[in-house]
Amino acid sequence: MSTVNSTTRRVLVFGSAGQGKSSLINNLLGREVAPCAEQLPGVTFETNGPFQFSHDGVSFDLFDTAGLNETAEGSVPAEQAANRLMDFVLSLKDGLHLILFVMNGRMTAALEANFALIQNLTGGKVPVVLVVSSCDKRLPERSNLTPAGEMQQVQEAVCGEIQQYTFLRDCAGVVTTITPWGNRSTVVYREHIAYSVETLKREMCSKSTTAPVLLYSDISSLTNVLVAGWNVCANYLGGVLNLVVDDQLAQKFASIGLNLNQARQYLVRLQRAAAKISANFAARRIQEFAGSLWDRITNPLVNIAQTVREVLAPSDE
C-alpha cells in the first residue's frame, strides 16, 4: 500500500445507515449539505460527497458512505451488494487520509462487520478515528460542570467501555459527539455540539496522514482488495454474492487504466473467483446449519434413550 502527495485530505465517513454520519458532516460544515436519511435496506455502499471544509489551514473532502446496514442482512439483493461494493472500491482509487467510523454506541453485528470490512479493504493502514454519536443521551440531567466538562466526562466513560471490544482498541482516536441537526436539540446542546465539533476537527488534523494511503496501485492489488471486501460481505449478507458483469461496470475500470475489452476479461475472472468465495461460504453455512439441526434432533433422542434405560434397569431392591 503506497502513498501519493496531496494538498486536500480525503476522509471516508463510514458506518451503517442511521448512525449520525450525515448529521456529523452537517455540523462539521455548519450548514445542511448532507441529507439525513432513514435507515433503509438496499443502500449498502451508497456514497455522497465530497463535502468540503478547512480547519487550521488543512482542507478536507468528506465522503459519506453507508456500509453494511443492520437491515441489510438477508434483504439486500446480492447483485446490488456485489456491484455496489465494486463501485465503492473503485471510488477509493485516489486513496484516503483518514476514516471516521461513526457509531451510535450500540454494539451490533453490522457494526463489527463494517469495521472488519474497512480493515480488510485498507489493510489497516489508514488511521481510523471512532466517532460515537448521540451522546446527548449520556449527559447528566443535573451537573455543575461546563458543557465542555460534561463532554469530557462522557468521553472518559465511552473510552472505558470501548476497551472491552478488542476490534476497536486499535483506533487512532475516539471522539464523542452530539449530532442532531435541525431540531430542538441543536439549540439546547449548542455549546456541547460546538465543543465536540472543535475536538473532532483537531483530531482530524492530527490523526490524518499528510499523503493519501493508496488501497491499490495495479490490477493485482485491486483484486486482493476486492476479494478481501468480498469475504466480509459474503459472510454478513448470507454467503452468496453475484457480480453482474456488463459494459457499464466495465467502463468504470477506465479510471485504473483498463480498456473495455481488458475490463470485461478481468470482470469475468473476478466473477468466477467471487462465485467460488461465495460457494465456500454457502457450503460452510450449510455445514454449520446441518450440524446444528442434527444436534437438535439427536440430543432429545439421547435424553429419551437414557430415561428409558434408567426405567428398565433392574432395581437394586
Image (cartoon, grey):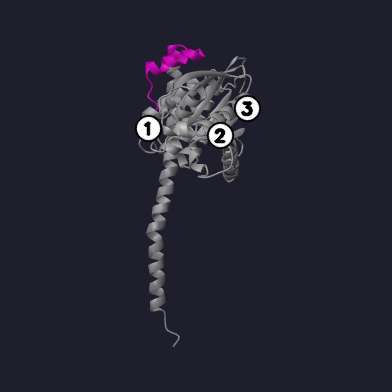
Per the image, the residue denoted by label 2 is: 130
Whether residue 278 is situated above or below residue 4 in the rendered picture: below
Query: Would you say residue 290 is visible in this rendering?
Result: yes
- Real-space Cα separation, disc 1 to disc 3, in angstroms: 30 Å
Position of the N terminus, as image quadrant, is: top right
Amino acid type indicated by mark 3: Lys
Is label 2 in a helix, a strand or a loop? Answer: strand
**Horizontal and vertical percent position of residue 47:** 44, 23
Distance between mark 2 and mark 3 Cα atoms: 11 Å
Q: Residues within 10 Å of mark 1 (few under 14, many from 20)?
A: few
Percent across and percent down for residue 218 are: 55, 18
Instruction: Say whether disc 1 or disc 3 marks the residue closer to the N-terminus.
Output: 1
How many other residues sit within 10 Å of disc 3, few (<14), some (14-19) or many (≥20)?
Answer: some
In the depicted view, which residue is nearer to us: 283 or 136?
Answer: 136
What amino acid is at disc 2?
Leu
Which callout, 1 or 2, points at the residue further toward the start of the chain?
1
Element carrying mark 3: helix
Q: CA distance from mark 1 to mark 2?
A: 22 Å
Label 2 Cα crowd, 10 Å radius (few <14 / some 14-19 / many 20+):
many
Q: Amino acid at mark 1?
A: Glu
Q: Mark 2–mark 3 contact, CB under 8 Å?
A: no
Main SS class of the magenta portion in the image: helix
Q: Residue 18, image x and y in percent?
A: 42, 34
Residue at left offset 39%, top offset 53%: 293
Q: Which of the two discs, 2 and 3, labels the residue nearer the N terminus?
A: 2
Q: Which residues are magenta?
A: 242-262
- Residue behind mark 1: 38
Residue annotated with mark 3: 207
Dividing the image into 4 quarters, which one contains the C terminus? Answer: bottom left
Q: Is residue 72 left or right of residue 2?
A: left
Does residue 17 show up?
Answer: no
Residue 257 drawn in magenta? yes
